[in-house]
Image: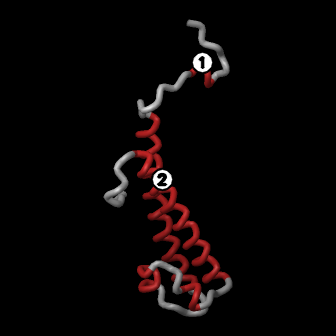
Amino acid sequence: MKYPDECKTASQKLEYTYAAQEKLRLVHNIMGDWYREGISREVWETLPYELQARFPYAITLTAEQWKEFQGIFLKATDKLSSSIGESREALKKSVLYNVELGDLLGLRSFK
């Protein structure tokens, strides 16, 4: 996955990927509403330009267009899931913090 230049660390990449996942979820909701119930032009105009170019405005989305969007959505979801997994694995290997397992387990450390 391509990240903005400011995303350098695993935690920044994970945060970016989760934000992207949320935006994708919201777009999926709009597209689903468009297919099931129809949407207004004002709502359509909130979609990313790339989707507006691919799916010109009409009151409802056709079954064929919905199926095409689902394919696009699934590819994006797979890409995000993979990126989340990679960032999580990188974070698990972090040595930034000294985790005290005794404290975490509720056991007292005797020194």
Identify the residue at the far front of this view. Answer: 111
Q: Amino acid at mark 1?
A: Gly
Residue bearing the label numbered 1: 102
Tell me the distance, in whole angstroms, between the alpha carbons under discs 1 and 2.
29 Å
Q: Locate residue 89, reporting x and y percent.
A: 44, 39
Q: Where's the N terminus, which quadrant?
A: bottom left
Q: Measured along the vertical axis of the image, is residue 111 above or below residue 76?
A: above
In the foreground, 41 or 72 = 41
Asked which secondary structure carries label 1, the reply is helix
**For residue 63, what is the image quadrant?**
bottom right
Residue bearing the label numbered 2: 15
Q: Earlier in the sequence, mark 1 or mark 2?
A: 2
Q: Locate residue 31, reporting x and y percent.
A: 57, 78
Image point (64%, 87%), residue name: 38
Asked which secondary structure carries label 2, the reply is helix
Q: Locate residue 81, reporting x and y percent.
A: 48, 53
